[in-house]
Structure formats: structure tokens, C-alpha cells
Image: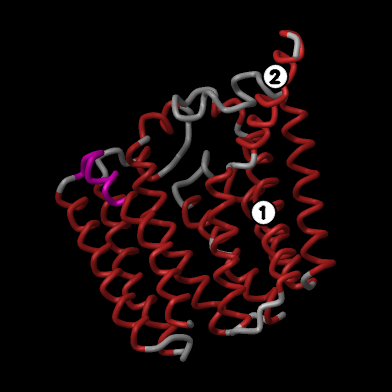
Amino acid sequence: MTQGTQNTLAIERSRLVDYWILTKPELTFLSVVTALTGYYLGADGSIQASLLLHTLFGTALVGGGAGALNQYIEREYDGLMRRTENRPVPSGRVQPYEALLFGIILSIVGIAELVLFTNPLTGFLASVTLVSYIFLYTPLKRITPLSTIVGAFPGALPPVMGWTAARNEVNPEAVALFALLFVWQIPHFLSLAWMYRKDYARAGYRLLTVVEPEGNMASRQILAYTTLLVPLAVIPWTLGMFGALYLILALLLSLAFLVVTVHLVRDRSNAAARQVFAGSLIYLPALMAIMVVDRL
């Protein structure tokens, strides 16, 4: 292999990595995992492999498309933040029109996948997720701190999409899953926004941690929403979705997460916020694992 060929392959690999980054793989992976959980619970033991694969693939495509479109829209602001300045578009490695086209293609193919191979309801929910994320949450981040609440709506829909792919209906059980993920996102994102508040302020975002940098309101909201997770974690049990094992473990997990957030109210530091953020990353997958294990 010549040096020129090696250089060409290296460039192509680098381009693939950049397009991978455009999909916001961490967020897309979270959407896929929560959709998988929703499908598993909705299927109630009657898992169809092909239907599950179409559900996860379509969810991944829509999630990746939303990530690419978000980075296209926020390219100028990403360039002002240390945390995001090296993303493919603001760094110049990917042209804006390329990110836009990539995001549109992924989104259209993903929605079509869900409509054609799962059911129209799931495709509709994917469309609502995409539209609310791109056209509501993304611009509102520069206007009002309420954007965090708005953004939690599309973020909480993937488990419902998994459920509707299996059941083709939205019922109280699906709403319970939505509520859990909706509320979980508030302490998760606000703790992240607290750690990077100066970065967000530099880019002109109107997040709660920017407009009130002392952190009084943010820490109290984190505590309030984490407290709300405790009764919300019980609701699936009251609906008959799970047994005593889930109830005990979900309560212990929720109370442990609550203890972590209490520390942030007393000590509004980056270290305390990092603990809350880490706790949120443990809480959600642990709760979903408890759900799955209880159903075995």
C-alpha cells in the first residue's frame, strides 16, 4: 500500500468519524436503549425480532438525524463554547450544507422505516420528537430557561415509541414510562448546565444556570424533580407492570439519587453538580435494568 493510499484511507476514516459525531452518538444510544426497554415491556414476552430491529434502527436514524440538524443550526454557537468548538461543523471539517443534508436524509429514512415497518403511530411519535427537538427546544435555548422543560418532552418519547411499536397504542403504562424519563432529564441536564454555565453564557444561551449563576434556583429545581422521581418510580408498580422486587429496588435507587442531590443544594459547586450528573447516568440505566429483571 502506497503512502498516498494510506493517507486517503486515513482521511476517509476521519470523515466517517466526523459524520458519526454529527449523530450525537451518546444521546442517540440513550434513545435506542430507552426504546428497547419500552418495546420489551410493551411486548410482554412476545418479542418479534424483525419488528424490534426495525424499531431500534428507525429510532437510531431519527435520533442521529436530529443530532446532525441540531449541530447544523447551532454551528456558530458551538464554535463559541470550549466543550463544542471542536465539533465537525464549527471546526470546519464538515461543511454546514453537508451536515444539513445528512440530518435530513437520516430523519426522513428513519421516520419512513418506523411508519412502514412498525406502525404509523410510532412513526408519528418519531416525527413529533424530531420537530419538537429541532423547532422548539433548539431555538428556545437562546430565549428562555423553560427550554429545559420543553426539551424534556422529545427526550422522553423514545420509550413510548418502543411501547407503541409493540402494542400500537398509548396507554397509562406508556405514559408512566414517559413521565419517568421526562422528570429524570431535568436534574440530568441542569447539573450538566451548571458545570458548563460559563460556556453556555459565552455562547448566549438563556439557560437557568446562566440567568441565575448563583445556582439557587437550579439546585432547588434539581432537588424538586429528583424528589418527584420517587413517587413516579412507584406508579408502574401500582399499574401492575412490575412486582415487589421492582418496587423495593426502584425506591432504594430513587432515594439514593435523592440523597446525592441534597448535597448540591448545600454545596453549589461543580464537584457537587458532577456527582448529580454521574448519579443521573447511573439512575436511568439501573432503573431500566430493574424493570427488565423484574419481568424475567
> Residue 27 appears at what percent x and percent y?
54, 49
At numbered mark 1, what does the secondary structure look like: helix, strand or loop? helix
**Residue 274 located within the stretch drawn in magenta:** yes
**Residue 251 located within the stretch drawn in magenta:** no
Q: Residue at x 20, y 62 (%)?
A: 259
Mark 2: which amino acid? Ile
- Up-down: is 22 above or below 118? above
Relative side of 141 to 72, left or right: left
Asked if the residue at tag 2 contacts the one at tag 1, i.e. Cβ–Cβ closer than 8 Å, the answer is no
Residue in the foreground of this view, choosing between 106 and 37: 37
> Residue beneath label 2, please?
11
Relative side of 166 to 194, left or right: right
Residue found farthest to the front: 1
Where residue 31 sits, quadrant-wise, is bottom right
Residue found farthest to the left: 266
> Residue 207 appears at what percent x and percent y?
43, 42
Q: CA distance from mark 1 to mark 2?
A: 25 Å
Where residue 48 sits, quadrant-wise, is bottom right
Residue found farthest to the top: 3
Where residue 82 sits, quadrant-wise, is top left
> Residue 35 appears at what percent x and percent y?
60, 65
> Residue beneath label 1, please?
60
Q: Residue at x 48, y 71 (%)?
A: 179
Disc 1 packing (10 Å; few <14; some 14–19; many ≥20): many
Residue in the foreground of this view, choosing between 241 and 4: 4
Mark 1: which amino acid? Ala
Screen quadrant of the N terminus: top right
Relative side of 22 to 196, left or right: right
- The span shown in magenta is 268-276
- Up-down: is 240 above or below 142? below
